Amino acid sequence: MFEPLFASSTGLLWHAIPIVLAISLVYGATRHEFLKPILWHAYHTAVWIIGFMLVIVAILAVVSWFV
């Protein structure tokens, strides 16, 4: 039952990785001036974004399971 949900979107999820990295680096660079704090902030932002995306995927999987 979950195969169509994940099989159709798995190829598209690979595009999210460079987008998340780019957004995280730009956001970190707007907050800090030196490389180490930029990378540290970018790491935390990327983890937050990926975690948020995983929560949304889990919610959609549960909803599609019951519908």
Image (spheres, grey):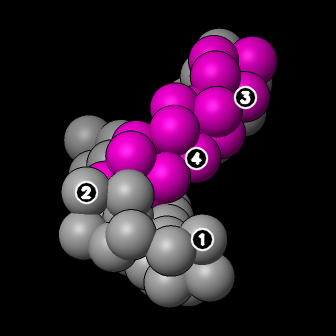
Left or right of residue 19, residue 1 in this image: right
Q: Can you identify the residue that label 3 sits on?
A: 14
Find residue 21 and name its label.
4
Vertical placement of residue 39 versus 25, above or below:
below
* Rendered residue at 49%/52% (across/down): 25
For the residues labelled 3 and 2, the Cα–Cα distance comes to 26 Å
Q: Determine crowd level at label 3: few under 14, some 14-19, many 20+ residues with C-alpha closer than 10 A.
A: few
Q: Can you identify the residue that label 2 sits on?
A: 30
Amino acid at dot 3: Trp
Q: Mark 1 or 4, which is nearer the eye?
A: 1
Find residue 35 and name its label.
1
Taking the magenta stretch, the answer to whether it contains residue 66 is no
Write the start and end of the magenta stretch as one range.
11-27
Q: Earlier in the sequence, mark 3 or mark 2?
A: 3
Query: What SS does tag 4 mark?
Result: helix
**Quadrant including the N terminus:** top right
